[in-house]
Image: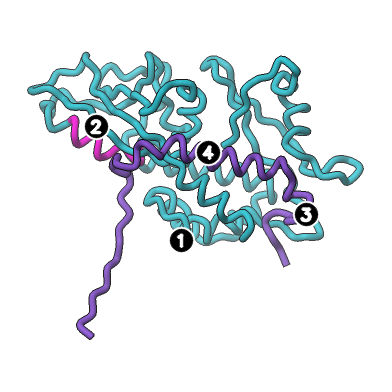
C-alpha cells in the first residue's frame, strides 16, 4: 500500500488549519471582486440533451 | 490524499486577475484597449495568453509583430516561472488587477529565454517534473510511466484539467509506507531581488534520529534569515 502524505492527528494542528485558512483567504482576496473577468483557459462543457 | 483534496483544488484553481496593456513602444493602426483575464496561478504565461495576443495583434500590422514578451514595472517576466510565483515574487504588495505590459519588439535577449512555441514550455515543465522525481524516487516513477502518461500530465496543466492532471501526478507524490517519505524533498526558495538565484539543496524529509522534518526545519537549515525575529515575508506556493 502506498499513499501521498501521512495523514495523522498531528497534521490536523493549528498550524495546518492556519495554512488552509490563509489559502482560502488568498483565493477570496484574489477572486471575489474579479469573478466577471474572462478565464484565460476555457473549460469545455459537455451538455447532453435527450428527448425522453 | 482525500483529506488534502480541498487544498489541492484551492491551489489548482488559484487565479490572478490581470490587466494586459500594450506597450506604448508598439506601433498600432488604432488604439489598443487593455485586455483582462483570470490567469491560473499554477500555469505559465505563454500557455494562457493566446486571447490577449490575438486581441493586440488585431490592431497591429503583421510586420510589426515579433516574439511576444511581458513586463511588470520595467522587469521582463520569465515565462519559465509559474504565474503565481511571478506574481508573489514581484507584485504581491500591489493592488489588483496585476498590470502587465505586453511587448512584440525589443526582446530583452540578456534577460529572457526565447519561447517561440508551447513546446518550449512543455520541455521545461517536464524537465522540472523529472528533476523532482529524481530527488523523490531516484526517477523510478517517471521512468516507469508511459509516454501517454507524460502527455496527460502536460495536457492536464495546459487545459486546466485538475482531474486529468492529478490522475497522473498522484503517482509522482506517492511513496511506500515503509520507506517513511521521499528520498529528498524537492524545493526551491526564490528571493525577490531578481539578481539572486534560487536556493536549492538536498534535504531529507526525516532527520538522522527518525523524526519527520517540517517546513520550519527546512527553512532554518537552508535559509535561516527567513526565520529570524526581524521577520521576513515567506510565501508558499
Q: Mark 3 and 4 residues: CB-CB less than 8 Å, in contact?
A: no
Q: Marks 3 and 4, Cα distance to the nearest angstrom?
A: 24 Å
Circle 1 residue: B148
> Circle 3 — which element?
helix
- Please, which chain is the residue tagged with disc 4 on? A
Q: In which quarter of the image is the N terminus of chain B?
A: bottom right
Instruction: Provide the letter of the chain coloured purple.
Output: A
Q: Mark 4 and 1 residues: CB-CB less than 8 Å, in contact?
A: no
Where residue B62 appears, as percent x and y from the top left, is 13, 29
From this view, report whether residue B191 is shown above or below residue A14. above
Where residue B29 appears, as percent x and y from the top left, is 8, 22
Residue B53 shown in magenta: yes
Horizontal arrangement in the rendering, residue B145 relative to residue B163 (left or right): right
Q: Which mark is residue A25?
A: 4
Residue A47 shown in magenta: no
Q: Marks 2 and 4, Cα distance to the nearest angstrom?
A: 26 Å
Query: Local crowd at mark 1 within 10 Å, few (<14), some, or many (≥20)?
Result: few
Circle 2 residue: B35
Q: Which mark is residue B205?
A: none
Amino acid at each position: 500500500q502506498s499513499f501521498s502524505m501521512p495523514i495523522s492527528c498531528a497534521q490536523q494542528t493549528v498550524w495546518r488549519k492556519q495554512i488552509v485558512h490563509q489559502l482560502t483567504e488568498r483565493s477570496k482576496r484574489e477572486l471575489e471582486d474579479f469573478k466577471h473577468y474572462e478565464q484565460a483557459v476555457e473549460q469545455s462543457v459537455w451538455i447532453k440533451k435527450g428527448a425522453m | 490524499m482525500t483529506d488534502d483534496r480541498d487544498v489541492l483544488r484551492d491551489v489548482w484553481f488559484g487565479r490572478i486577475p490581470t490587466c494586459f496593456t500594450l506597450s506604448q513602444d508598439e506601433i498600432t493602426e488604432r488604439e489598443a484597449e487593455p485586455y483582462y483575464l483570470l490567469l491560473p496561478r499554477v500555469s505559465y504565461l505563454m500557455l494562457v495568453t493566446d486571447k490577449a495576443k490575438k486581441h493586440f495583434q488585431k490592431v497591429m500590422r503583421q510586420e510589426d509583430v515579433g516574439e511576444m514578451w511581458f513586463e511588470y514595472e520595467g522587469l521582463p517576466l520569465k515565462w519559465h516561472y509559474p504565474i503565481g510565483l511571478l506574481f508573489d515574487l514581484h507584485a504581491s504588495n500591489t493592488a489588483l488587477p496585476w498590470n502587465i505590459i505586453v511587448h512584440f519588439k525589443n526582446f530583452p535577449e540578456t534577460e529572457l529565454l526565447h519561447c517561440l512555441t508551447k513546446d518550449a514550455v512543455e520541455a521545461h515543465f517536464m524537465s522540472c517534473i523529472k528533476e523532482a522525481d529524481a530527488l523523490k524516487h531516484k526517477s523510478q516513477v517517471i521512468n516507469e510511466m508511459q509516454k501517454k502518461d507524460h502527455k496527460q500530465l502536460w495536457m492536464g496543466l495546459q487545459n486546466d484539467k485538475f482531474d486529468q492532471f492529478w490522475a497522473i501526478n498522484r503517482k509522482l507524490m506517492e511513496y511506500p509506507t515503509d520507506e517513511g517519505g521521499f528520498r529528498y524533498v524537492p524545493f526551491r526558495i526564490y528571493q525577490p531581488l531578481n539578481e539572486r538565484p534560487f536556493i536549492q539543496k538536498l534535504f531529507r524529509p526525516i532527520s538522522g534520529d527518525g523524526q519527520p522534518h517540517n517546513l520550519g526545519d527546512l527553512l532554518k537549515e537552508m535559509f535561516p534569515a527567513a526565520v529570524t525575529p526581524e521577520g521576513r515575508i515567506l510565501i508558499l506556493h
